[in-house]
Image: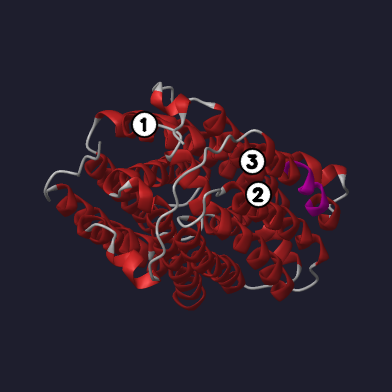
Amino acid sequence: MGNPTRQNGKWLNPTIVGIGLASLFSDWSHEIASAVMPAYLASMGAAAVWLGVIEGFSDGLASFAKMGSGFYTDRLRRRKPIAVLGYIVTAFGTASFGLATTAWHVLLARSCAWLGRGVRTPVRKALLAGSVTRETYGRAFGFERMMDTLGAIIGPASAFFLLPLVGGYYPTLFGLTLIPGLIAVAMIAFVVKEQDRKPVPHISFGESLKALPPRFRRFLIAVGLFGAGDFAHTLLILLATQRLSLTHGTLRAVSISTGLYILHNVFYASFSMVSGWLADHFNKGKLLAFGYFLAASMASAIIFLPLNVWTLAGIFVTGGVYVAMEETLEDSFCAELVPEEHHGMAFGTLATVNGIGDFASSLIVGLLWTAFGTKVAFTYSAILFAVGGLLTLRITQSPTTMRIN
């Protein structure tokens, strides 16, 4: 059965709105937890390496869920129930942070939440791509990223205002994350309108991978190398907190760092729609390469500039802009490179490669930071960012992206 809204060429339809709202509320929920997690771990006496382990392991676990979910959902007539389940697991996993008393408890809770996130990610992207035309992929994915990031702005802001109201009692704050988390579940369950689709005939997992176009597979190499340096930006919060506490005191440094993370997410949200519009009008590969080089410039600033409030503000802003470009353009480029019937597998594979990269980057950057300091840790990232950008530029010089009627 076709999608009438899609055939009429209207990209802002109920499915796009529902997915966007779900992304907003779900990010609102888990960004409350993310914003205070470094301070929460510090209150337990955990070292910086624990933050890298938690971020890296949970991202790595989610990556395998993304691959399995993408492969499985291409074979279903209805994908939406899988997405609903994923959002439920994420909501309760995030709230369970409040039960933690040691760093490994936080690791367990984060892993549970990110397992649900992994299951839902390729399904959500396939639902989104299937509800719009190829000519509007950029705007659709940009809108979803914008809404997701609005949640990432509201989340830390909520943490900033709620933490004093709950007397600094973290379990209560984490319990409150259930409210936006369950609203996200309702958005997927009741607002998203999924049309019946013809499932892909059953083939093996290996055959599904081979069915992905060669150019897309080369694209995955570039994404993987970039991702191996693309550390979780909660490490930026830790960096700002450590540096600013020397001149502003610990409590003031935590407040400023949270504010900088909100600034990061404001630019992330703003440039998501800008990146989506650009993706629909210009070469996606070249734009993505520019975003990768922008990431390299951010890491270089950490290495070479004195880290005060103003330079850290520039670093957080640059981080928000490049992440907006990276996420919007990777998704829309993926949707363009791969036939629609294989979108679930393609998005799952892309998300898995990113997840493996996130696991490696957060863990390695955390270890290098602990063992050798920030200059060595972020030099590692800067090199991989630049290599990813160069490889992406080479892909844009390949034969023209295929078009499917």
Label 2 vs 1, first from the N-terminus: 2
Q: Residue at x 49, y 39 (%)?
A: 145
Q: N-terminal of the two: label 1 or label 3?
A: 1
Number of marks drawn: 3
Q: Residues within 10 Å of mark 1 (few under 14, many from 20)?
A: some
Residue at numbered disc 3: 188
Q: Residue at x 26, y 28 (%)?
A: 281
- Image marks 2 and 1: residues in contact by CB distance under 8 Å: no
- Circle 3: residue type: Ile
Residue 261 sits in quarter: top right
The disc labelled 2 sits on which kind of residue? Val
Query: On residue 133, which mark appears?
Result: 1
| Residue 22 on the magenta segment | no
Task: Find the distance from the CA under tag 2 to the CA under tag 1.
Answer: 24 Å
Classify mark 1: helix, strand or loop. loop
Q: Nearer the viewer, residue 106 or 204?
A: 204
Where is residue 276 drawn, in percent x and y? 38, 33
